[in-house]
Image: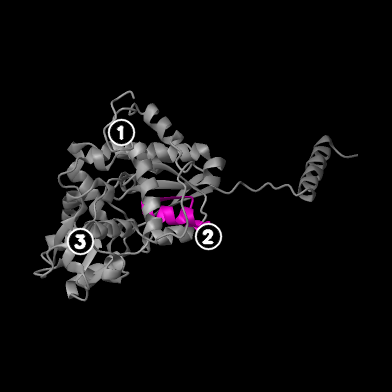
Amino acid sequence: MYSIKSRVLNVLWMSLALLVAAGGSLAVAEPLRVRIGFASVGSDNRQFAGGSSAAVAHSERYVDDELRDLPDVKIEWSFFKGAGPAVNEAFANNQLDFAIQGDLPQIIGRANGLKTKIILASGAHAPTYLAVPKDSPIKRIEDLRGKKVSIFRGTNNHLAAVKALAGHGLQEKDLQVINMDTATTNAALISRDIDAAFGNFPLAGLVDKGLAEIIYTTKQDSRSYERHATLIGQEVFLRAHPDVTQKIVNAIVRAAKWSSDEANRDAFFEISGRTGFPVAGYKFDFSNQELKYRNSPLIDDSIIEHYRFQAKQAKEYGLVRREVDVNGWFDRSFLDKALASQGLTNYWQAYDASGKPVAIGQ
């Protein structure tokens, strides 16, 4: 006769066999991989971004700290030399769950059917610059007619450049526009293979080295020329993992609070310098602007109206082929919870659709 121990073992083995036959598994669940992309990359392909709260959240491991109680969640960061267009391609191929990306490529992605939600600002209110080689005869935008000019097509610098040109009586067709990424643009300016370039803070780094001059900035022009970048997420991920999404937003809001403190201005630029781009370029980029203004995470009515206007102008300038409806695109629920839980509901100034400050409590 079998012993009681033998009978118990037989029952266990039979139960295991039934589990296997029924398709059951004793394997440990796979970790959840959360894939976050930046529509930028550091100099010489350094895996860093700079000049935003999300960049600080990455560099200083805010997101990892926020997720420490969820050990099965693994964050994977990616940085794209191809900027916004490359991020759209990654979203289309289901290779990203979130990205920090500029307004125009987001609009192009929505026009092409990407199912995403915009959930907080990171890198908003940014200027665009027009740079020329040192001692160039070009002194103003109007002098660009017929000249070879670099514009990184499909990025949020693209639409800002088009609007600046239009404001000064020019169109892209009036120039010899060359599509170049940041690194190629910098090299072409230094070698004088191009006459001018529209771009952002890396151009200021060339100025600091005495290799170029900035002859125009959108800071001196209409606020409608500003560039905005936001955290955007796949709808399917947000629905499936609202808890993880909330923690990521919590982390970036904490980083935004630190990045908005003027006492941290120099430290903010030093962290941004991990990209390999000159710290002086970041300092120039943020000059005469409060950190609180540039690092606000708010998706307020001015941001939403800006996207509505950007979408309309992108269609008018032929950058998208169809109308883009921004209604329902913004989900502020995660941001609102993060602000409330951290006591920051009224910390940043909100603006209405016309760009005027909103009184606290309204």
* Disc number for residue 350: 1
In this rendered view, identify the residue nearer to me: 36 or 211.
211
* Residue depicted at x 26% and y 43%: 294
Q: Earlier in the sequence, mark 1 or mark 3?
A: 3
Residue at position x 24%, y 38% in the image: 292
| Badge 2: residue crowd in 10 Å (few <14, some 14–19, many ≥20) | few
Q: CA distance from mark 1 to mark 2?
A: 35 Å
Residue 303, horizontal then vertical, whole percent: 35, 42
**Contact (CB < 8 A) between labels 1 and 3?**
no
Residue 93 is tagged as: 2
Q: Is residue 180 above or below residue 28?
A: below
Which residue is denoted by mark 3 in the rendering? 130
Q: SS of the residue at dot 3?
A: strand
Mark 3 to mark 2: distance in Å?
34 Å
The single residue placed furthest to the top in the displayed view is 361
Q: Nearer the viewer, mark 3 or mark 2?
A: 3
Find the distance from the CA under tag 1 to the CA under tag 3.
29 Å
**Residue 43 at x, y = what percent?**
27, 63
Q: Specify the segment rendered in magenta.
A: 91-112
Horizontal side of residue 335 vs 186, given as left or right = right
Q: Amino acid at mark 3?
A: Leu
Query: Who's the residue at 28% across and 38% down the image?
Result: 355
Of residues 123 and 171, the one nearer the viewer is 171
Q: Secondary structure at mark 1?
A: loop
Amino acid type, label 1: Ala
Can residue 298 be seen?
A: no
